[in-house]
Image (cartoon, rainbow, N blue to C red):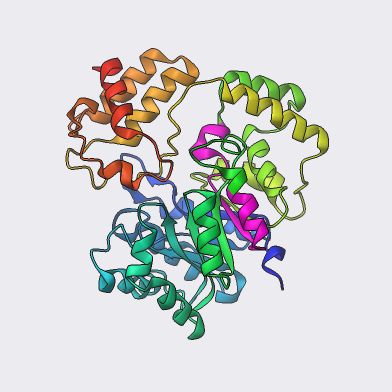
């Protein structure tokens, strides 16, 4: 069976539901229910990573909610090896695979990725010999398909795919907001992957939740075109309709989001966007481009290494409430709540570690200064 025969919706385990008041503790019972719904709908692709959640919480949840409860050949599981987070040297990096196997109890991984390759970290994977290491795991049968997730320029993507023509798939950030975004270059990266004939797993189809609740000007366009369609459905169907897509990862965080996604993305329900719907998306893209915002997806790669303990994604979320939705008081309240007992935006010492970790290549230092001037 071709990889492209994979059902077009994947379950991203990055933003699983958590217990009330305990943001680091995953709600396993709700996660089990979501896994059951996903599997019963005929969907099979699950995606996690070594660095997702505190102490591997996402991989551990995959074991408890999925691996321990379903036959191993009834689903496919993807995880990732990271050479720049939680890996001080080659040995620590390579050890991640064995730890992931132990955490998940999966026995092998159907998809294994070099994680979040960017301009400032891709040489680490060469330095540590990770390409050859992962290819060796595939030869041993411990990995069925190998690839990498990518957050950089089309020029670097072309270089990597030329040097590693045997990759089985690639994971790219693609959504209608970032299609022509010069920082993300979704379209250009998609075209490079297509040139090399590599199947594409899509991440961030709703841009960290932004396109699940877009600005009112965008909502009005989408609702006028189809009042009955959910807002996230436009974003997920948009990318799932592109040629060469292996699957689209949706980081569902509760049962309601699962129900919504399944209603239009289970195999019996999915329909690619029509020509008329593509034209609606083009109008939505124009409306989005006219709205200033901070392009943060809330991945949280920046915050753990901050020496001042600044909750950067939370601060940017508060600012976007003001910029995108005009919620000035709510944004201020969110800022005050998120920085209570932690670093404030003005505490930034401009060390730059956050900017090095940011897949969206946000000028975080400059943006924090802006947030400090507004909130403090």
Res 307 quadrant in image? top left
Res 54 quadrant in image? bottom left
Residue 157 or residue 95, whichever sits in front: 157
Examine the rendering and report whether any part of residue 246 can be seen.
no
Question: Which quarter shows the C terminus?
Answer: top left
Give the left or right position of residue 301, taking residue 290 as reference: left
Question: Count the marks: how many?
Answer: 0
Residue 347 or residue 121, whichever sits in front: 121
Residue 124 image position (x, y, % from top left): 33, 63
Residue 218 image position (x, y, % from top left): 63, 23
Give the magenta-colored segment's residue range: 189-212
Rendered residue at 61%/54% (across/down) = 192
Rendered residue at 17%/34% (across/down) = 349
Residue 72 or residue 4, whichever sits in front: 4
Residue 244 image position (x, y, % from top left): 70, 57
Give the vertical position of 217 relative to 212 (above or below): above
Residue 118 or residue 44, whichever sits in front: 118
Examine the rendering and report whether any part of residue 137 can be seen.
yes
Residue 89 image position (x, y, % from top left): 24, 68
Give the vertical position of 317 relative to 108 (above or below): above
Q: Is residue 191 magenta?
A: yes
Give the left or right position of residue 369, taking residue 33 as reference: left
Q: Residue furthest right?
A: 275
Rendered residue at 70%/25% (across/down) = 283
């Amino acid at each position: 069976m071709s990889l492209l025969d994979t059902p077009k919706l994947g379950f991203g385990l990055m933003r699983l539901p958590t217990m009330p008041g305990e943001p680091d503790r995953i709600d396993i019972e709700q996660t089990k229910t979501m896994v059951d719904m996903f599997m019963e709908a005929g969907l099979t692709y699950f995606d996690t990573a070594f660095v997702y959640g505190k102490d591997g919480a996402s991989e551990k949840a995959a074991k408890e909610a999925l691996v321990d409860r379903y036959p191993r050949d009834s689903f496919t599981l993807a995880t990732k090896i990271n050479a720049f987070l939680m890996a001080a040297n080659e040995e620590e990096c390579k050890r991640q695979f064995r730890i992931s196997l132990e955490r998940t109890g999966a026995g092998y991984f159907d998809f294994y990725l070099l994680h979040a390759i960017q301009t400032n970290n891709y040489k680490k994977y060469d330095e540590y010999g990770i390409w050859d290491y992962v290819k060796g795991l595939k030869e041993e049968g411990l990995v069925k398909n190998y690839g990498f997730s990518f957050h950089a320029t089309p020029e670097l993507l072309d270089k990597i795919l030329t040097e590693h023509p045997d990759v089985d798939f690639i994971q790219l950030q693609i959504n209608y907001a970032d299609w022509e975004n010069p920082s993300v270059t979704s379209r250009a990266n998609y075209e490079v992957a297509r040139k090399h004939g590599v199947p594409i797993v899509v991440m961030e189809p709703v841009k960290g939740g932004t396109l699940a609740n877009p600005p009112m000007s965008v909502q009005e366009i989408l609702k006028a075109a189809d009042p009955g369609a959910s807002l996230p459905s436009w974003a997920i169907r948009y990318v799932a309709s592109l040629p060469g897509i292996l699957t689209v990862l949706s980081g569902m965080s509760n049962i309601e989001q699962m129900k919504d996604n399944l209603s239009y993305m289970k195999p019996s329900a999915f329909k690619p966007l029509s020509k008329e719907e593509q034209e609606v998306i083009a109008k939505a893209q124009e409306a989005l481009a006219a709205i200033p915002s901070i392009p943060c997806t809330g991945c949280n790669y920046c915050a753990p290494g901050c020496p001042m303990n600044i909750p950067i994604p939370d601060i940017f979320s508060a600012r976007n409430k003001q910029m995108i939705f005009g919620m000035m008081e709510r944004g201020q309240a969110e800022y005050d709540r998120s920085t209570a007992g932690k670093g404030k935006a003005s505490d930034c010492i401009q060390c730059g570690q956050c900017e090095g970790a940011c897949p969206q290549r946000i000028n975080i230092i400059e943006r924090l200064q802006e947030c400090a001037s507004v909130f403090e």
